[in-house]
Image (spheres, rainbow, N blue to C red):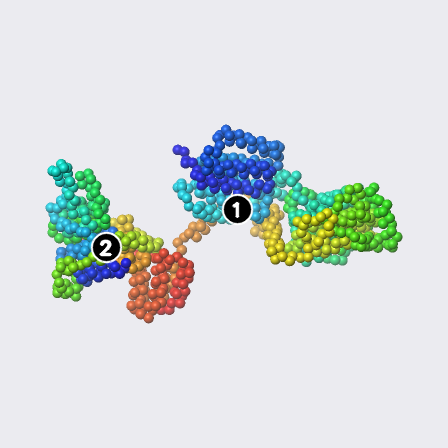
Amino acid sequence: MKQLLDEAVMQAGKIIVGKEQTLRLALTCLLANGHLLIEDLPGVGKTTLAHTLARLLGLQYQRIQFTSDLLPADIIGVSVYHRGDESFQFHPGPVFTQLLLADEINRATPKAQSALLEAMEERQVTSDGMTRNLPQPFFVIATQNPAHQIGTFPLPESQLDRFLMRIHIGYPDERAERILLSGEDRRSLLEQLTPCLTLEQLRDLQQQVIQVHVSNALLDYIQALLKFSRNSPRFHHGLSPRAGLALINSARAWALQAGHAQVLPEDVQAVLSATVAHRLHSGSDTGVAEGQGLAQFLLESVPLP
Amino acid sequence: MNPPPLNHRSLLSLSLITLLVVAPHFARLDPRISLAFFAVVLLRVTSLYRPHLRLGRWLLLGITLASAALILSLYPLLMGLPAKVALLSLMMGLKLMECRRRRDLYVVVFLGYFTLITHFLFDQGMLQVAYVVVMVIALSGLLIEAGRTESHSGWPLHSLRLAAGMTAQALPVMLVLFFLFPRLNGPLWNLGVDNSTGQTGLSDSITLGSISRLIRSRAVAFRVDFDQAMPAPPLRYWRGPVLWHTDGRRWGRADLPKTALVSYRSDAPPVSYQVTLEPSPNDWLYALDLPETLPAEASLLADFQITAKDIRQRRYRYSASSRLQYHTGSLSERQRRLGLQLPDTVTPRMRALVSRWRAESADDRQLVNRALQFFRNEPFHYTLNPPLLETNPVDQFLFDSRRGFCEHYATSFTLLMRLAGIPARVVTGYQGGERNPLGNYLIVRQSDAHAWSEVWLEQSGWTRIDPTAAVAPERIERTFEFDLQENTAPGSPVIFSAGDHDLLNRLAKQFGLGLDAANASWHRWILGYSSQQQQRLLQLLGFGSLSAFKLALTMVLAVAALVPLLILLMRWRDRDRPDPVQRDYGKFCRRLARKGIARLSHEGPQDFARRVIRQRPDLQRPVSAIIDLYIALRYGAEDDPKQQRRLRQLVRNFRA
C-alpha cells in the first residue's frame, strides 16, 4: 500500500515540482476522508494541485469557479418545470460529484459559501424539501487567496473548521522553478496523467487508516497538545474536540502513508500545522498568516509525555 | 416504576449457588430435608425452561406449610441446631421459588451469607473455611452481576474477580477482628450442639464386643506433641478409664476419691507433652502411664484416671507430663477389696487352672508370668471378629473359642489374677499411635483403642500387664494398622500389614499425613487462639491485660484506623507510576545527553534517532534497535513483558 501511495506522490511530483511534503499532506487529507483547503497566492499552482489529485485518484470531478455573483443553486442544482409530465425535475448541480474543486472559494458571498459548506458537512443536500445524498466518496478541495487580497469574503472560523487541513504551497525553490520554466506545459502533462488508484483501493486505504493503532501514550500526547492550546495565553481560544479528532485522523493517515505500523508522535507533528493552523488565533494581535507560527509554537512547547 | 424482572441467567446462577451454599449441610440434615431442598431447587431450575411448571401463589403456600410440617415432624419443637438449619435451608429454597425481581435476589443472597455462617457451627476445619470463602466470593459476584444495569451475556469473570478483590480487601479487617475480638471461654454455640449425635470414643465400661466396633474407625482420637523424643511404641500406653467392677460380662468404673498428685518413686526423667483432644462425649483425659503433672482443670482419681470438667464436645488442648517407669507404693484397703471382687460366673475349670498355676509358682510375679505363658502357648488368636459368647463369656473364651481381641484378653486375664488372689483391674485407653513425620507429632486414632490389665505386686506396686502382647506382639510393637475394609470371617486371625508396598498407597498415606499436619496446625494456631493466647499477645504488644470492653474498643479503633489506611494504600498503588518502558527510554536519552546529543522535549523517537545517527553514524545499529523496540512497546500494540526485558537489556548494554 505504501508503494501505491509513493507511486502516486511520485507521479504528482512530475507536475507539482519540488513540493513532495505538500503533496503528501494533500493525499493524507483525502485518505483521512477530510476536505482540503489550499491557501496561497494566485499562480503558485493551487488549481493544478487539485487537478492532479483528482486525476491520480481516478475520481469523477467537477469544478466550480467561485465568483461574487455565484448563487447556491449554481452549486446545488435547481428544479425546473418540465412541461411534458407537468412536474418539477431536479437538475443536479456540480456538487453531485466525487471530487469537487471549489476554486477561489473566498470570492463568493457568504450565502454561496455556506451552501457548499453545508454539503461538505452533511454529505447531502436539501433542495425543495428533498434530501439527496451526495456520491461516495465526496471530497472538496477548495482553494482560496490570502484573505488580505481585494474582493474576498474571508471564511468564518466555524466554516474553516469544516476543512480537515489547510495547506500552503509556497514559491518553488530555484531548481524546481527552473524545471517548471524550461519544461512542458503543465496542462498537457496533466492530460497524460493516468490514475494510480482505483476507487476500491481508495476505500480500502481509508479503511486501513481507521485501523492504524493509536496507543494510550499517543493519546496522552494529543491531549497534552489540546490542553496546552487551551491554557496558554498565546492563543485566543483553544483547540476544540473536533480539532483533536481531526488531528488523530490525519495522524493516522499520515502514519499509513509513511508506512508506520502505529501512529508516532512524529506523525502527529507532521500534520499538526496543516490540521490546526487554521483553527488557531493569536491571543494578542490579529495577524493574518499567523496560524502556522502558532502551530509551530504549540509543537515546540509541548514535551512528549 | 417496577424494576425489570430477573433474567434466566441470574436465576439459574442464583439457584446453583444456593444449592452449593447449602450443600455441606446435606450430610448433617435428615436426608428427607436434603431431598426436599434439592427438589425445590430442581423445580425452580426446570420452571425456567418450562414456564407452565411455575407454581401459583396458593400451591406455593401449600408447599411451604408442608415443608414446615416436615421439619416439625422430623425435629419436634425445633430442638437442636440441625432443626434450625433445616428450617433456614428449606425456607431459602422456597424463597427461590418466588424470586422474580432483583429485590428477591438480594434477599436470597443475604440468606445465603447467613447460611454460610451456620456451617461454622458444625465444622471449623480448614477445608470448610476454604469452601465458605469460595462461596462468599460466588455470592458477592452474583450480587455485583445483579447490580449491573445492562444485560450482557459475557462470562461473569469480571464480577467474580471484583468480588474476589473485595473479599481480599476485607482481609486486614478480618485479621484485626480475629486477634482482638473478645474471646469467651468455651465455644459460643456450645448450647445448641446436639449431643445425641455423639462421636465415637471409649466408654466408661466394657461389655465384651464394644471395643471391636471402635477399632474399625480411623477417626482421630487425639494428637500429641512431645517436648522431647517420642517414647518407643511399646511404651505408648495412653491411660483412660480404669475398670474395677464386673458381673462377668460387663466391666465398670469404681467410684474412687480424687487424689493429690503423688510422687512416684522413679529414676527416669519425666516425659512432657501436649495433647489436643478431638471432641468427644466423655469427661476424661488421656495421659501416658503414669501421669505426673496435669492441667489445672483436671483432677486425678486414686486409680490414676484423669477427669476434667467442661471438656465434653469440644476440642481441648492440654499439657501433661508422665513418668514411664514408676512405683505406685502401697495398696489401700478399699482398692484391695475392689481389686479382688469376683463375679458369680467363675467356673470350676477356671479355678482349677488358677490353682494349678499357684502350685507351680513361688510368688505372684511367677504366677503372672505363668498366666502370660498360658496365653502365649495355647492356641489363642487375635481377631477383630470374635465369635459370639453367649452364656459365660470368660469361660467360653478361655477354654473353647480362644479367639478375641484386647478386651477379651484383658478382662479374662484380670479375672484369673483375682482368682489367684492378686488385686487386678482393667485399664482402657489407647496404645501406640502413628507418628506424623511432617509435623513431628503423634496421631492417635480410634483404631488404637486398647485394654490391658494392671496387677498389684508387692515388689512393684500396680504393674501393667498386657496379655494381648503375649498373643499378638505386633499389635503393640508396631503401629496398629491393617486393612479395615477387609471382610474377615468371624474368628479369622488378623494379618498385620507388613508395610506399604504399593506406591499409590504410600502417596495417599503421605498426602493424608500432610493434610492431618495442616489440620493440626490449623486447630492449634487458628481455632486454638483462646482468651489466654489473646492476653499473651496483647502483653507482647505492650497493651497489658485488657478487659473485654476495652478490647472491643481497641478493635473498633483499629478497624477505624485501618480502613482509611487501606484506602490510602490503594490510591498509592493506583498512582501514575512511570512505566518501565518510559524509564528505560529516559535512561537511554540521558546517556546520549551526556555525550552531547540531547533529545528536545518535543522530539519524537524517530526524529531523535535520525538526528543521533546523523551525528554518530557508528551508533546506528544499537540506536535503531532500541528505538524500534521502544516505538513498538510505547506506541504499538506490543505489550509483551519479554520485549520489555529485552529493551532494558539493550539500554543497559548501550554505550555511547
Q: Is residue A275 above or below residue B29?
A: below
> Label 2 lies in what chain?
A
Residue sitting at the far right: B359
Q: Find numbered disc 1 in the image and state the secondary structure of the residue it sits on.
A: helix
**B346 sits left or right of B92 in the view:** right
Report the amino acid beneath label 2.
Answer: Thr
Numbered circle sitting on residue B378: none
What x and y, as percent, mark residue B227?
A: 67, 56
Q: Nearer the viewer, mark 1 or mark 2?
A: 2
> Label 1 lies in what chain?
B
- Which quadrant would the C terminus of chain B be assigned to in this image? bottom left
Quadrant of the rendered image containing residue B555: top right
Q: Which residue is mark 2?
A: A198
Residue drawn at point x = 36 percent, y = 62 percent: B629
Q: CA distance from mark 1 to mark 2?
A: 63 Å
Quadrant of the rendered image containing residue B503: bottom right
Q: Is residue B44 visible?
A: yes
- Which quadrant would the N terminus of chain B be assigned to in this image? top left
Q: Are marks 1 and 2 in contact (CB under 8 Å)?
A: no
Residue drawn at point x = 76 percent, y = 45 percent: B243
Q: Which is nearer the eye, B390 or A120?
A: B390
Q: Is residue A152 visible?
A: no
Q: Which is nearer the eye, B104 or B411?
A: B411
Q: Which is nearer the eye, B644 or A135?
A: A135
Report the amino acid beneath label 1.
Answer: Val
Q: Which residue is mark 1?
A: B133
What x and y, as percent, mark residue B10?
A: 45, 40
Residue drawn at point x = 76 percent, y = 58 percent: B267
What x and y, as percent, mark residue B404?
A: 75, 48
Residue drawn at point x = 63 percent, y = 43 percent: B186
Q: Which is nearer the eye, A84 or A38?
A: A84
Q: Is residue B514 above or below residue A132?
A: below
